Image (cartoon, rainbow, N blue to C red):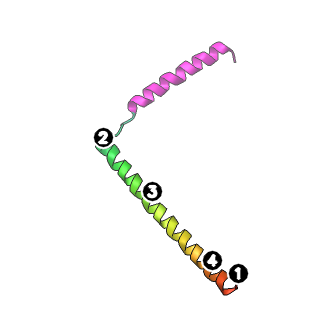
Amino acid sequence: MSAVEKVKETKTFLEECYVEMQKVTWPDAEQLRSATIVVILFTIAISAVIWLMDKTASWVITLIMGIFGA
């Protein structure tokens, strides 16, 4: 494949990308704000669940180690 063909293919690819980007329905400010809030709340919730699991596992391991005198 020659350099000229690669340049032509690249140009075609970029043109197709531009056409496809024109078809995209972009969110408005309210949709973006709502989605951002959902992501932040979900991240906080999952973080809390992981923290709780970590603390529970730590407590169980400490309990087991205490039983066996470690």
Task: Tell me which residue sits at (67%, 81%) in the image.
Answer: 65
Q: Earlier in the sequence, mark 4 or mark 3?
A: 3
Judge depth for marks 3 and 2 and give the one in front: 3
Q: In this rendering, would 61 be left or right of 22?
A: right
* Magenta part of the chain: 1-23
Q: Which residue type carries mark 4?
A: Ile
Give the spatial CA distance, label 2 vs label 1. Answer: 57 Å
Asked if the residue under mark 2 is in contact with the one under mark 3, i.e. CB atoms within 8 Å, the reply is no
Q: Earlier in the sequence, mark 2 or mark 1?
A: 2
User: Residue at label 3?
Assistant: 43
Comparing 39 with 20, the one in front is 39
Give the spatial CA distance, label 2 vs label 4. Answer: 48 Å
Q: Earlier in the sequence, mark 1 or mark 4?
A: 4
* Residue 40 highlighted magenta (yes or no): no
Q: Which residue type carries mark 1?
A: Ala
User: Residue at label 2?
Assistant: 29
Looking at the image, residue 21 lies above or below residue 56: above
Comparing 2 with 28, the one in front is 28
User: Residue at label 4?
Assistant: 61
Judge depth for marks 2 and 1 and give the one in front: 1
Judge depth for marks 1 and 3 and give the one in front: 1
Judge depth for marks 2 and 4 and give the one in front: 4
Residue 34 locus on image (x, y percent)? 33, 49
Task: Tell me which residue sits at (52%, 65%) in the image.
Answer: 50
Number of dots carrying numbers? 4
Q: Quadrant of residue 30?
A: top left
Mark 3 element type: helix
**Which circle marks residue 70 in the picture?**
1
* Residue 15 highlighted magenta (yes or no): yes
